[in-house]
Image (tube, rainbow, N blue to C red):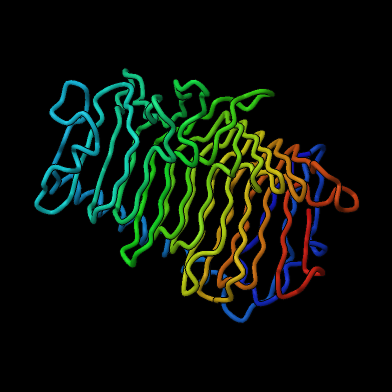
Amino acid sequence: MLIFLAFASLSLGFPIDFEKIDSTVHENTSAHVSSPISVSEPLASKSQQFIGLEKDADKLQSAKVGKILQNDCQIDVGANEICTTVDAALATSCSESIYAIELKDQIHVESLVVNKKSVILIKGQDDNSQPRTVWKASEQAASLYTIQLQQEIITLQYIDFVYAMTTESNPVSTPTSSIIYLHTLQEIYSEITIEHCNFIGLGNGLGSQQTNSMLRSEGGQRVIVNDCSFSSANVVNSPIQATDYFQFSVSNCNFTDINSIGASGAIEISGGRSDHFSIAIQSNIFDNCVGSLYGAISVIASNQDTEESVSISFNQITNCTGSVTGGIYLEYDQFGTTDLGMNTFNGNILSLTLQNDDQGQDAHIYKISRGYVGSDSI
């Protein structure tokens, strides 16, 4: 069954009630559109505010990348270059601490820790006639992360991130914790943008080598992922995890063939910083993602703040499985703006039938202030 889920932008000082949804069935397709909702403020203005926020953030990031291209230290990294590692390139003195680094080799091996106040662009090969740059951790010994970031603004482009098996007597997959880890302990928050990158596991079939998360952020200012893929993985934790951020955005990405012991089969988001944050998960494809609780997406935010914004829209979720829902799980207290528009669902199932009539295979919405009676499933 293919389901189209369309909601207007909602000002959520009132409950969502899926029981009021009208349903029109055409052969094997059901189209669900929410009933008109009365609010104290115009819906258009709320939606426009959110869209404006996203566009302003995109302009800001474009300006930063433009600054990199205009005022950078441009450094090539490779076996035949002066700098053979990114770490060596970042040790080079640049007047404004702005680096544009290009990986010249088809395979780049390095476990990188960056802890300096700087603006960094790391770019792989983007020539369509050449293989994409592959970045992996060293096989000689296990490392926690391939890239660990602490207080910088970094953009990663055109890189395939992969796991490797160590050559030790008891081989393990490396990195053992996460491919990319963004962790901020100071008031100087890190920002990361990942574009046109692929994150590839070691297979998701029976007996495939288990790995850990692919992208994990704790305390990042902004986490932006565009036009990337996450695939073929048997993971301990959800492929993408984020908490304590100001802005989180994943758009135009593919999540395919992922089995997760963690809560979600693709994206697992906890609340952002208490004063203000925004979440945008838009125009992604989720296919054959399995999580212990949620098949594709989970967003849990207990903060009460009318300035917060969440948009989970225009996603395609197919053949995903979780014990609570195969699709989208949203648990919240209050958001200023919520958009759950135009998501499509097909073939999602519950791994455990916890509800009557198999409700919840596509989405499960839980409003904390309403108690359990506020839980809506479709």
Residue 251 placement (x, y as % from top left): 49, 46
Q: Residue at x 74, y 65 (%)?
A: 35
Q: Is residue 313 above or below residue 317?
A: below
Q: Residue at x 57, y 37 (%)?
A: 255
Front residue (pair 312, 159): 159
Q: Quick check: 8 left or right of 144?
A: right
- Where, by quadrant of the figure, is residue 96 drawn? bottom left
Q: Quadrant of residue 104?
A: top left
Image quadrant assignment for residue 58? bottom left
- Left or right for 161, reference 357: left
**Which sits in the foreground, 94 or 173?**
173
- What is the x, y in percent for residue 23? 80, 53
The answer to whether 67 is drawn above or below residue 126 in the figure is below
Asked if residue 377 lies left or right of residue 101, the reply is: right
Using residue 376 as the reference point, say whether residue 275 is left or right of it. left
**Residue at (44, 20) in percent of width and height:** 167
Q: Residue furthest right?
A: 356
